[in-house]
């Protein structure tokens, strides 16, 4: 299954990101689950990294059909998506309506442990 990997600077204090995460895990958990399922996401993880240029957020998404999902997500005006995209824009400066998959990423190395091999 394809992976989409994105990196964006964190333009707000990390506490603001953690409030967003708390909403996704808490009162908006059911909406979050429905949101990811709607776009064929099987896994998504967010990672904060401290760099010389400040904090960045790395997002890794395992998704069935990235191009189709990106088009639908960018066009969506569903209330949860509108809220989610506004949070992303506010926290990172990245506009998911304009560029839902983020800047292109070139995968230069991947390794998988073959099943049944020692």
Image: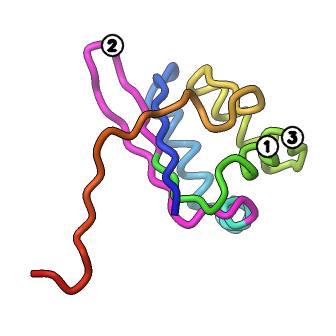
Q: Residue at x 15, y 81 (%)?
A: 117
Query: Residue 100 at what x, y percent from top left?
Result: 68, 36
In the rendered image, residue 103, in percent from the top left (x then y), is placed at: 56, 27
Mark 2 crowd level (few <14, some 14–19, many ≥20, 10 Å Cα): few
Q: Nearer the viewer, residue 57 or 11?
A: 57
Mark 1: give few (<14), some (14-19) or many (20+) Cα within 10 Å: some
Q: Is residue 52 magenta?
A: yes
Q: Work out whether 38 lies above or below 7.
A: below
Q: Nearer the viewer, mark 3 or mark 1?
A: 1
Q: Residues within 10 Å of mark 3 (few under 14, many from 20)?
A: some
Which residues are the magenta region?
38-59
SS for dot 3: helix
Q: Earlier in the sequence, mark 3 or mark 2?
A: 2
**For this view, does 76 lie left or right of residue 52?**
right
Q: In this figure, which residue is indicated by the disc labeled 2? A: 53
Of the 4 image quadrants, the one containing the C terminus is: bottom left
Q: Earlier in the sequence, mark 2 or mark 1?
A: 2
Q: Are marks 3 and 1 in contact (CB under 8 Å)?
A: yes
On screen, 14 above or below 24? above
Which residue matches tag 3?
75
Q: Main secondary structure of the magenta part?
A: strand
- Secondary structure of residue under mark 2: loop
Which residue lies under the disc numbered 1? 71
């Amino acid at each position: 299954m394809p992976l989409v990997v994105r990196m964006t600077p964190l333009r707000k204090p990390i506490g603001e990101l953690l409030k967003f995460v708390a909403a996704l895990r808490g009162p908006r958990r059911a909406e979050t689950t429905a949101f990811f399922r709607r776009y064929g996401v099987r896994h998504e993880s967010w990672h904060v990294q401290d760099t010389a240029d400040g904090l960045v957020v790395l997002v890794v998404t395992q998704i069935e059909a990235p191009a189709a999902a990106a088009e639908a997500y960018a066009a969506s005006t569903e209330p949860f998506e509108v809220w989610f995209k506004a949070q992303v824009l506010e926290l990172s400066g990245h506009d998911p309506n304009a560029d839902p998959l983020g800047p292109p990423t070139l995968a230069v190395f991947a390794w998988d442990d073959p099943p049944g091999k020692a």
